[in-house]
Amino acid sequence: MLKIISLVSLLVFSQLSYSEELTDEKKQIIDEMLDITGALKIGEMMGNAAAGQMINALRAQSKNIDEKAANVIKDEMGKLMHEEFIANGFINNMSHGIYHKYFTLAELKEIVGFYKTTTGAKMASLLPKITQEGMMEGQKHGMSLGPKINQRIQARLVKEGISLN
């Protein structure tokens, strides 16, 4: 038993000593990558999306939302998202841990190097639009599945003899 514990301890500690430290240099490279890729604009994107959903929900409830009110909602959501994701460093700090977990310093430098090429710069400039477009298409497809989901669940509940009334 002592041999097994010793072996497990050796393996765990060798892995810990092998893993790279999250240095200031690595944090700076991650921050540079976030800046180059436009990832720091995610707060703005989230604010716009949340504001749009809120406005649509209010309009669906037959509330009269004029453009001035819609602009106030968009403005406040944008400010809040900026404060809570960008200004307080949340995205940077969160990203440090995540990217540190999956990439070495050398790999991050290569990624940043790619984003500094013409193709990488194009990718970085289009990625927010591509992501947003993909999210919108996915959401649209998901919403179109509502009737099909409802039908399948109802059929399965009947088959299982389950009544929700």
Image (cartoon, rainbow, N blue to C red):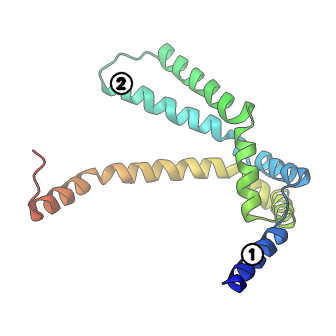
Q: Can you tell which of label 2 and label 1 is closer to the viewer?
A: 1
Of residues 15 and 78, the one drawn nearer to the viewer in this rendering: 15
Return the x and y of residue 54 as percentages of the image width and height: 44, 28
At 74% from the left edge and 73% from the top edge, which residue is drawn? 12
Q: How many marks?
A: 2
Say whether residue 76 is left or right of residue 52. right
Of residues 127 and 3, the one drawn nearer to the viewer in this rendering: 3
> Residue 115 occupies which quadrant of the picture?
bottom right
Q: Disc number at residue 64? A: none
Say whether residue 4 is left or right of residue 22. left
Q: Disc number at residue 59? A: 2
SS of the residue under disc 1: helix
Of residues 103 and 49, the one drawn nearer to the viewer in this rendering: 103
At 45% from the left edge and 53% from the top edge, which residue is drawn? 138
Task: Say above or below: 115 vs 4.
Answer: above
SS of the residue under disc 2: helix
What is the three-letter code of the residue carrying label 1?
Ser
Task: Say above or below: 84 vs 133.
Answer: above
Image quarter (top left, top right, bottom left or bottom right) of the C terminus: top left
At 60% from the left edge and 38% from the top edge, which residue is drawn? 45
Return the x and y of residue 26 as percentages of the image width and height: 86, 55
| Residue with the mark numbered 1 | 9
